[in-house]
Amino acid sequence: MSKPLLIDKYGRQLTYLRLSVTDRCNFRCYYCMPEEGMDFAARQELLSFEELYQLSALFCSLGVNKIRITGGEPFVRAGIIPFLRKLSQIPGLEEITITTNGTLSKKHIQALKEIGIRKINISLDSLDRERFHQITRRDSFEAVYACIFQLLESGFEVKLNCVVAEGKNIQDLVPFVELTKDYPLAVRFLEEMPFNGTETFQTPQWSYRKIYAHLNAHYPVLEQLPNAPSSTSVNYRVPGYEGTFGIIPSFSRTFCGTCNRIRLGATGELRTCLYGPPATNLRDLLRLGFSQEQIEQEILDAVSQREKDGFAAEASHAWHASMSLLGG
Ligand code: SAM
Ligand code: SF4
């Protein structure tokens, strides 16, 4: 008998797993975690690499074909490269991508290439060293900037994730688009979401409409690009530019109708929507000795209860966990 697929009651098939391999990070981006006092999970609370592998293989047997490695900062976890190598062997897994803050070391770049990873997202919110420092609370702009070009030179497809916020980086938006003039980069501007690990969050002033209007005022002629079926961004190119830029309505949530993502947090929490509470904890089930079939059934149950969109998901939920734990 063939295995069931992860299809929710609205007919959306979940084929894309976002896997947080650690909640720890060498940065302290203001939108993701407080500067001090982060209560990181104890080592034994994190899914081990063996558990991450077992669960990933189970998801792939249920129709997942793409895994994004995220965190926390994936490259602060020792042993990540051998884990990725093993992950890449899972039958049915067509693509592994990574989201990183770009402080990965040069030697990893070659290893990632050998593993067959081709696409990497780097978080970069400013092209100015001072502003970068203020946003990430670390003075590491040069290293991250250099990493982007090392990746491009090594043949990777590179996207830059930029969280847009008043008083932080508005002066960087046009320079980011200018960076796409000569380089085949895909810049993605994101609305800020309420996952900063604190109780304070205000509705972002910079919605996707405002970001678009700002850029359109500067670039009156923009080519809108065709979208992949489950893409969360609306993408554009300035005519003649090498690269592209896109805008992601991550707070406005206009893309939920085609969302194909499921998230496994670093401590085993399974979320069928970023804005909702965890549906279950797969680490606990594994450690309690549940069989593969029982865990599979838990995952199917979670998917069957998936909410229609991010507004419905957050309705019954206080949502201030750090993105680093959720699998952002
Ligand atoms: N440390 C890696 C990095 O920064 O790329 C991976 C983990 S990070 C949580 C994944 C992505 O989530 C980053 O691109 C980051 O900009 C984004 N992110 C984190 N908190 C966010 C928030 N409150 N609103 C919007 N995006 C956020
Ligand atoms: Fe670290 Fe990424 Fe969160 Fe920044 S966004 S604090 S780099 S996990």
Image (tube, rainbow, N blue to C red):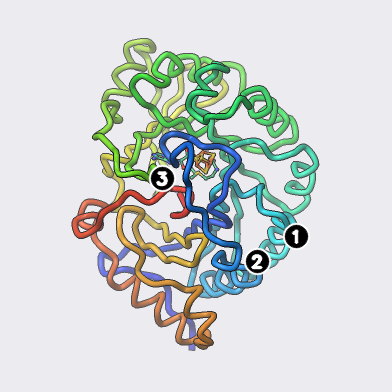
Inter-mark Cα distance, 3 to 1? 30 Å
Judging by the rendered image, the residue that carries numbered circle 3 is: 231
Judging by the rendered image, the residue that carries numbered circle 1 is: 82
Q: Which mark is residue 213?
A: none
Judging by the rendered image, the residue that carries numbered circle 2 is: 49
Kind of residue sitting beneath label 3: Ser
Q: Nearer the viewer, residue 260 or 51?
A: 51
Q: Are marks 1 and 2 in contact (CB under 8 Å)?
A: yes
Q: Nearer the viewer, residue 87 or 79?
A: 79
Answer with left or right where residue 34 lies relative to residue 80.
Answer: left
Q: Is mark 2 within 8 Å of ligand 1?
A: no
How many other residues sit within 10 Å of disc 2, few (<14), some (14-19) or many (≥20)?
some
Q: Earlier in the sequence, mark 2 or mark 3?
A: 2
- The answer to whether residue 326 is above or below residue 92 is above
Q: Position of residue 121 (x, y in %)?
A: 56, 39
Q: Are marks 3 and 1 in contact (CB under 8 Å)?
A: no
Q: Residue at x 42, y 13 (%)?
A: 171
- The answer to whether residue 57 is above or below residue 265 is below
